[in-house]
Amino acid sequence: MFPHNSEFKASPGNLKVMHHLVLYSASPETVDMLKYLDGLDNKEGYQCYGGALPDMLGDKKTREQFEQKYPNGVKQLLDNNFWLAQWAPGTFGYEFPKNTGVPIKKGSILIAQMHYYSGFAPGEKDSNGKMEFKLSKHVDKPALVIQVTNNDWFNKPEENEMTIASGEVKTLSVGTSLDEISNYITKNINLDKSKIKNLELHSVNLHMHAHGASGKTYLKPDNKDPQLLLSIPNWDLDWQRDFVFTQAKIFPVDTLKQNQLFVECTFKNYSDNTVYGGVGSDDEMCFNFSYVALDLE
């Protein structure tokens, strides 16, 4: 048995420069590998634009050097980390729903991905920031924060499906089945899927950047009308939050394949340049984040 994170709060030191925080949990078998990579440049931390892993692994020489020391290490790193929590402007922290929590194996390491507006706030520093956690020894329903997006929206410009020309208004959407979500959770927490009784959808959270205009999150059952979960008709980058349902949406395990969770984003590009999907402050994103728990037999 291992502890579960049941409450999270982040307090940035300088809101002028802070864009977002994503907190990842990496399993114990990856700790030595991550510490090795962290020490390669003799600097504190490492650059990680796209996720928990260092960008330096994109360099062929560095990657080969790493794989010589840790055979198949890149795959192990990719397979053994997950999104734990997040902060963005407008978010104040949250206590996870009763009897739920995100499992954290003993010996795991936490990776904080900090995205700063360094180019837009020259000379500003981030200090005195802090993160607070509440741990529970046991919860009845293990959970994870799930991201719904399209990975092709992060490709290089010539291969990117998220291309918004100057002056263009564009709407994009993507969905995933609740069955795929349950597969992701059981894989990351090493749980036997046959033990699932129900899937519980507890929250939604829309995320775009400065060219976002409006967006929504909805459920799409097979052969039925979509069920709207969240609508933001006037997107504001500085007002982001998790919208927690007063009552969780509960789906018996035999209905998971018939239900899909969708996110839809509309962008208006008022700039003189084409905007692409990506991880930079000038790029765009379309995400839904949901807290999803599993009710077990």
Image (spheres, helix red, strand yellow):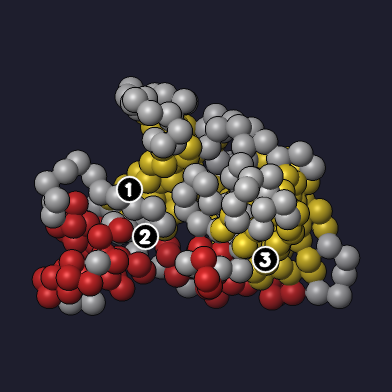
Q: Residues within 10 Å of mark 1 (few under 14, many from 20)?
A: many
- List the residue tagged with mark 2: 81
Discs 2/3, front: 3
Task: Judge whether 157 appears above or below 86 on screen.
Answer: below
215 in relation to 28, above or below: above
N-terminal-most mark, 2 or 1: 2
Figure quadrant of the N terminus:
bottom left
Residue type at mark 1: give it.
Answer: Ile
Q: CA distance from mark 2 to mark 3?
A: 23 Å
Q: Which residue is mark 1?
A: 111
Which residue corresponds to mark 3? 174
Of the numbered discs 2 and 3, the one sitting upstream in the chain is 2
Kind of residue at badge 3: Val
- Residue drawn at 56 percent across, 58 percent down: 276
Residue 179, given in percent of the width and then of the height, sits at 62, 72
**Could you tell me if residue 198 is visible in this image?**
no
Residue 292: % across, % down: 59, 55
| Circles 2 and 1: CB atoms closer than 8 Å | yes
Element at label 1 = strand
